[in-house]
């Protein structure tokens, strides 16, 4: 479980995050949603430690990340896996070497076991025949899947995904969403996904935090989102005609039941 | 005033970065692998250009000395002697390192800059890897190890270039050999090696700093690459003055 308490982040005079309080549950896919420029990426960078909050606390299962020593932070980071927006694969390494990298760095197991674990992670994301390819030789969707395999290689307790579906077609996006959802439940990971993809919101959003202008405006599940009484959230979620029709149909159905 | 503040800020950041770089590697087997790769990429891949440039510069120095210095009152071996001293004391160490600052410096800055803007360095940091140490230390150690070999090759290629001019009839092989052997001071060779090792550190660390601290996009990576070459070249020239005074 990850908990944020009164988190603030400023860049000079500009306050980007304002008093964020949120709870990200264990074994669930926790989504952070919001418009571009709302502070989602800054929030995630603060949570993973790439940025330091101006004030506030980030608790990883009772461990306050901000007050940990440098050594303790490094140890905690080894419990994290992250999937970046552009996959951030090491382009001088093959697919297999990318997945093996965290194992080579932190595992004392023999080489054969590390290869076996890396191949297992790759097969888990349905990439059995791309071992010797370089990131530049595979598609965007495959790169994301390699990034997922690399992120889970060390069996992390916390998984972070920064817009994992950006630049992908809807079908591939669903595959990536299903992978993240499956891995989270099978391995009981605390997963935080930063997204503005409505398919992800409706499909895998078990715990959604809506960020607007640097504030956490709403928190709930993808079921509750249909009945949320928040104007800003409604404007964001039901911005497209199709989703607005879905909302209207949902409201009518609800009225009829009443 | 603003430039001074800016320079001091960069110096402070550079020292901080070097503090992270010189730490104990997270995993020695990974360090050795990177170290060998960097020696190959930065050093071995530069041997060709070092040999070609040194050969022709050696030949040209020999021709120029012959044309401009030699006279009936000068011993004939002076051409070989002067060529040797120039190659040993300045060209093979300082000038060759300036040339390598262009090749190696831009390579390092653009590689690390691209890794920074594509979040590959962030990925390392999130894994709990000391990214500065993992990426930069093997480059510094690799070039510092291979540079003495490059200097030795450069001196040898320069001398071969000087011999090659004898085929043009300007001087004879025996005259050149006599000059190359005349009052040879072994310390001058070691001076060149010491200088080259210091320059290798300057080139790799400054270029790595420029690349590692890039913020922005491809334009900034290009700028960092240019800055890396300019800054490391200027620092090599400054260091040359101090080292020459100190060592000779």
Image (cartoon, helix red, strand yellow):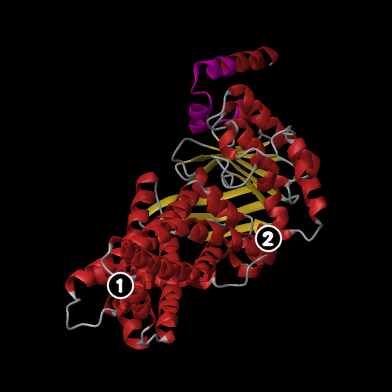
> Does residue B223 lie above or below A199 as drawn?
below
**In the rendered view of the protein, which quadrant contains the C terminus of chain B?**
bottom left
Q: Where residue A96 appears, x then y in whole percent?
A: 70, 44
Residue ID at (58%, 34%): A137
**The one of B106 and A229 positioned closer to us in this rendering:** B106
Q: Quadrant of residue B27?
A: bottom right
Do dots 2 and 1 share one subunit? no
Residue under pointer 2: A76
Per the image, the residue denoted by label 1 is B237
Q: Are marks 2 and 1 in contact (CB under 8 Å)?
A: no
Residue A226 lies in the magenta stretch: yes
Query: The numbered mark 2 sits on a residue in which chain?
Result: A
- Kindly state the secondary structure of the residue where label 2 is placed: helix
Is residue B218 in the magenta section? no
Q: Residue at x 36, y 55 (%)?
A: B224
Q: Looking at the image, can residue B118 be seen?
A: yes
Name the mark nearer the viewer: 2 or 1: 1
Crowding around mark 2 (Cα neighbors within 10 Å: few <14, some 14 to 19, many 20+) is: many
Q: Which residues are magenta?
A: A225-247
Chain to which the residue tagged by mark 1 belongs: B
- Which image quarter holds the N terminus of chain B? bottom left
Magenta segment, prevailing SS (helix, strand or loop): helix
Residue B159: give x, y in percent of width and height.
38, 69
- The residue at the point 51 percent across, 43 percent down is A40
Q: CA distance from mark 2 to mark 1?
A: 45 Å
Q: Position of residue B211 (x, y in %)?
A: 43, 57
Position of residue A184 in the picture relative to residue A48 (left or right): right
Residue B58 sits above or below residue A215 on the image: below
Q: Residues within 10 Å of mark 1 (few under 14, many from 20)?
A: some
């Amino acid at each position: 479980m990850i908990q944020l308490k009164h988190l603030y982040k400023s860049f000079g005079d500009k306050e980007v995050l304002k008093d964020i309080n949120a709870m990200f549950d264990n074994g669930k896919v926790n989504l952070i949603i919001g418009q571009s420029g709302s502070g989602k990426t800054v929030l995630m960078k603060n949570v993973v430690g790439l940025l330091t909050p101006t004030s506030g606390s980030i608790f990883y299962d009772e461990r306050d990340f901000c007050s940990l020593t440098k050594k303790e932070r490094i140890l905690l980071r080894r419990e994290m896996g992250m999937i970046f927006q552009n996959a951030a694969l090491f382009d001088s390494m093959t697919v297999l070497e990318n997945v093996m990298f965290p194992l080579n760095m932190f595992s004392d197991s023999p080489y054969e076991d590390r290869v076996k674990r890396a191949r297992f992670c790759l097969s888990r994301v349905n990439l059995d025949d791309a071992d010797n390819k370089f990131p530049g030789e595979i598609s965007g969707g495959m790169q994301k899947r390699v990034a997922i395999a690399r992120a889970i290689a060390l069996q992390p307790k916390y998984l972070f995904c920064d817009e994992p579906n950006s630049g992908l077609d809807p079908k591939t996006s669903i595959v990536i969403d299903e992978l993240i959802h499956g891995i989270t439940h099978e391995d009981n990971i605390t997963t935080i996904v930063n997204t503005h993809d409505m398919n992800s919101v409706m499909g895998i959003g078990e715990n959604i935090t809506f960020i607007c202008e640097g504030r956490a405006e709403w928190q709930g599940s993808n079921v509750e989102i249909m009945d949320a009484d928040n104007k800003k959230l409604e404007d964001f979620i039901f911005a497209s005609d199709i989703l607005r029709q879905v909302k209207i149909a949902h409201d009518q159905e609800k009225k009829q039941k009443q | 005033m603003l430039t001074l503040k800016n320079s001091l800020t960069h110096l402070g950041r550079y020292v901080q970065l070097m503090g992270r770089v010189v730490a104990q590697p997270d995993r020695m087997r990974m360090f050795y692998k990177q170290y060998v790769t960097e020696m190959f990429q930065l050093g071995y891949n530069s041997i060709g250009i070092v040999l070609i440039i040194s050969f022709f510069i050696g030949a040209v120095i020999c021709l120029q000395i012959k044309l401009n210095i030699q006279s009936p009152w000068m011993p004939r071996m002076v051409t070989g002697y002067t060529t040797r001293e120039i190659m040993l004391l300045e060209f093979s160490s300082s000038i060759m390192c300036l040339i390598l600052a262009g090749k190696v410096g831009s390579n390092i800055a653009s590689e690390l800059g691209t890794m920074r803007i594509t979040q590959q360095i962030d990925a390392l940091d999130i894994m709990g890897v000391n990214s500065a140490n993992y990426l930069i230390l093997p480059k510094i150690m690799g070039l510092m190890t291979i540079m003495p070999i490059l200097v030795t090759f450069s001196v040898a290629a320069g001398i071969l270039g000087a011999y090659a001019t004898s085929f043009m009839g300007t001087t004879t092989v025996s005259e050149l050999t006599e000059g190359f052997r005349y009052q040879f001071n072994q310390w001058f060779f070691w001076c060149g090696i010491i200088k080259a090792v210091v320059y290798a550190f300057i080139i790799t660390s400054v270029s790595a700093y420029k690349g590692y601290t890039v913020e922005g996009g491809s334009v900034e990576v290009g700028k960092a690459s240019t800055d890396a070459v300019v800054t490391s070249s200027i620092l090599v020239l400054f260091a040359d003055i101090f080292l020459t005074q100190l060592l000779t």
